Image (cartoon, rainbow, N blue to C red):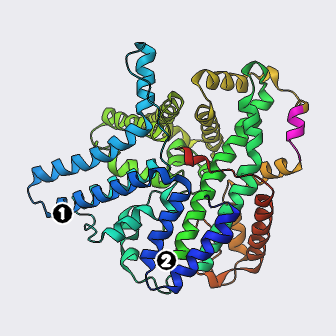
Amino acid sequence: MVFSSIIFIFYFLPVLLLAYYASGWRTAVLLLGSVVFYTWGEGKYLGLLGGLILLNFSLVRLLTRTTAERRRVLLLSGIVGLDLGVLCWFKYAGFIAESINALFPNTLPRVEHHLPLGISFFTFQLISYAVDVYRGAVPGEPSLRRFATYILMFPHLIAGPIVRYADIADELHADRRGSGRIGLGVQYFIVGLCQKVLIANTVAPLADYAFGLDTGALDATTAWLGALAYTLQIYFDFCGYSNMAIGLAFMLGFTFPKNFDYPYAARSLTDFWRRWHISLSTWFRDYVYIPLGGNRHGRFKTVRNLLVVFLLTGLWHGAAWTFIVWGMFHGAFLMAERIGLGRVLDRSPRILAHFYAVIVVMVGWVIFRAETLAQAGDYIAAMGDIRTFAPPDVRLRQLLDIELLAALGAGVVLSFPLLPACLHKLRRPRADAPSPHLSSRLDTRSVHAIPTAALLCGFVLSVAVLAGTSLNPFLYFRF
């Protein structure tokens, strides 16, 4: 079950909200609904997730009762090792065996696993909880039911954002009677639905076509259009999911952290990573980069720490050399910006700095999207071969219909903070314009008539599109 589906919007969600607000057992209803949601999509691994929750809960409780520092360190190491071990076994064992066998044939047996849905997200949440309790940043949760609800909560369970226990601890313990901001949640949900259905899904065929061509048949026109389509697809797909998750959380009385802040408006790769997948970036900052020393021990160690973080960032996204190279590609540019390029960008015209950031990010997405490093190299070479710029061929012209062109245009415009600026001018005095990129303190009573009408039209159009198309899961489900 995915958020952008008829069964979720018109059956699962209304029934859950009705039960949630009609009963006095909101945490229990949310936990049960989350179990049903996960079972619907990945019932095979519900026992694995349940076992991890029980083990982490028990071990962290033991950690809170342990006073000897050496034992506390050993316990924390065991908890983190357990969670990372499960993640590595399911996500990386096959890749490691395949890589070793490529160097030394028949050394290891072939390992094949189906990747449990959401494992990259819930293991990181389990680790952050254990580390925060060890540091004394949060108290250990005494209730297994509340802890299980925190991990299993269906809005963030499958594809984030990575919600830390500290983000929602107070709300987990609150009554939440009357705390649900349903109107605000509906706005966020509809914005995310439109981003996913009307933009990401619409431009996806162009990206699939370009990346599916034999490299010998790929010209610069098709390559650039395909790269643009995928650049928009992955942003609006994942940002759409995050906004829908944030909206669902508002409906349930919770406040999730913002996960995107117009990343394509960045003027450097450093700026890009402050805006893209913010919950993952801050997770690596707080649990990897800073513990390694951050930027406190000289330039060499700062660069080393950056490269370690981005190697892990690439690996987090998938067990393939393309993801590793993509992570190191970004790490190399951040390293360059750290040692001098950043100062050059600061002194450059804004348009040039922005152009640099967008081009580097687009080339990075080619590496990310390609099936192999060889395909990535050939695709980038085609983008750079200006001799092959030509009018679109027959097949490409068929793809570039009015709907796809409109989605490309809307995607480019909405990738920049132009809409909030317009809403700011339209809003009534002392009212906050609804936007998925503004703070969580928005008041639904301040909704302006024009954006409300636009949201309603977008919802109707999205539902009409969903009714006529097959299921299209979110891209980040595979990570």
Q: Residue at x 46, y 16 (%)?
A: 102
Question: Magenta stretch containing residue 396, yes or no?
Answer: yes
Question: Magenta stretch containing residue 436, yes or no?
Answer: no
| Mark 2 and mark 1: Cα distance apart in space | 28 Å
Q: Residue at x 72, y 56 (%)?
A: 197
Q: Residue at x 33, y 35 (%)?
A: 299
**Neighbourhood count class around disc 2 (C-alpha, 10 Å): few under 14, some 14–19, many 20 upward:** many
Residue 272 image point, x, y percent? 54, 47
**Neighbourhood count class around disc 1 (C-alpha, 10 Å): few under 14, some 14–19, many 20 upward:** some
Residue indicated by mark 2 = 253
Residue indicated by mark 1 = 64
In the displayed orientation, state which residue is furthest to the left: 68
Range of the magenta residues?
395-401
| Numbered tag placed on residue 43 in the rendering | none
Residue 363 image point, x, y percent? 63, 33
Camera-side residue: 465 or 416?
465
Check disc 2 and give the amino acid type: Gly
